[in-house]
Image: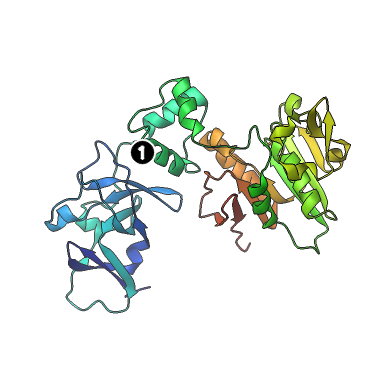
Amino acid sequence: MAGLVYTISVGGIQYGLDATQVAGTFVIKQIAPVPGASADVLGLHVWKGALLPVLDPRPHLGMHSLRGETQSHGAAVVIRLDGGPVAILVESVTGPLADFGAGRNMLDPATLFGRGSAPSAPDPWADMRAALWKHASYSVSDVNIAWVMRRYRSLKWGRVLPSTEELAADFLAGFGSPCFDTLWDENLRAGLRALLPGPATRHFAIWNPWCGRCNDALSLACILALERPRLKVKIWAVDALAAIVDAQTSSWSPADVPDYLGKSGLLEEKGGRLSGGAAVGARIILVCADAFEPVPESFDMIVCRDRLSYMNASSQTAALTAFKGALRPGGTVITGVHEKLPSNDWSEQRDTHLSSWKFRRTAQ
């Protein structure tokens, strides 16, 4: 892209940026403030799963700073500095263009901001990370930080930290995980239907690590029995706690079981409650093991909803590495709707009710 230029508008004046310094552009609607940051740091914003400092070029151009204004939003240009990417808040951006015009206002970001690396700023989430991990074993990471930021800025919370176990539980209640205690409803069934293979497929393997009470595994078995009755399905439901890894002994009140699941033929009534019948054993392989242990085969789908958010960062990395190794080409990973996988490795498949991802495989 040598010779190409992005045109930006700052304070009504047009400037140029060498296209080789630009990593991307996006519209910025809200910025998380950073107390104690340098004067040209407006705050932080998540872009493609990365948390970027948002810089204000105006003070360096002799203009009034936007810092402190309640409506700091507009176009953002992501530029490359030695220490990593940063975003510059501008009024508009166009490009790349082949000709900006000789002698026009070209900006060098490193010179403009007086630094060749990304600005250092206090981590505004340090106390939040520490509090949620201490009181709820919940790790704030790139997987879930966008949701944590939204929750923290909500009217209810303002600047209050979840500094006790009760407050942490209250904070995380907004996470809205449906995975731990409920079966899949009609909306999730519709979302899964869109991800299923065509009628020519005969076999379908699913890995459900950290399966808990088998809500996901049992729901998947019932949905596939209804949607693809001829499909040979194997679901590896894995959890280290043997007492809870049993889709046949786990039971639910009929009022908590969606009507369509009862039509699958996989549920039986016992003592006024519904549980997985004998037919479940033909579809779900229950494994008492650490989910990080190597699995014996590869899979068309991995279902791990809202589990990553309750791991520390190193465990999240280990889990995603395991997913890459176990997923067949073209396979899908389903996470919680609030969870975001790293965009450099994973592409999101848009759906209203399910968050699903494809691994970006590169040629070997």
Where in the figure is residue 2, as x and y percent of width and height?
Answer: 35, 74
Quadrant showing the N terminus: bottom left
Using a 10 Å C-alpha cutoff, classify the residue at mark 1 as few (fewer than 14 neighbours), some (14 to 19) or many (20 or more).
Answer: some
Q: Residue at x 41, y 41 (%)?
A: 150
Residue drawn 70% across the image and 36% down it = 215
Question: Label 1 sits on what residue type?
Answer: Arg
Q: Quadrant of the C terminus?
A: bottom right
**Disc 1 marks which residue?**
153
Q: Nearer the viewer, residue 262 or 147?
A: 262
**In this orientation, does residue 86 appear?**
yes
Left or right of residue 206: residue 310: left
Q: Quadrant of residue 167?
A: top left
Question: Can you say whether 23 is above or below 129 in the image?
Answer: below
- Please identify the residue farthest to the left as the structure is shown: 62
Q: Name the residue at 21% across, 57% down.
A: 111
Where in the figure is residue 142, as x and y percent of width and height? 47, 43
Q: Quadrant of residue 98?
A: bottom left
Please tell me whether residue 178 is drawn above or below residue 168 in the rendered image.
Answer: below
Image side of residue 329 versus residue 31, left or right = right
Above/below status of 119 relative to 178:
below
Between 119 and 67, the one nearer to me in the picture: 67
Residue 285: percent from left, percent from top? 81, 39
Q: Quadrant of residue 151?
A: top left
As helix, strand or loop, the secondary structure at mark 1 comes to helix
Q: Please tell me how many numbered marks the rendered image carries.
A: 1
In front of the other: 232 or 322: 232
Question: What colouring does the structure picture have?
Answer: rainbow
Using residue 44 as the reference point, say whether residue 289 is left or right of it.
right
Residue 295 appears anywhere in the view: no
* Position above or below: 278 against 225: above
What is the x, y in percent for residue 105? 18, 69
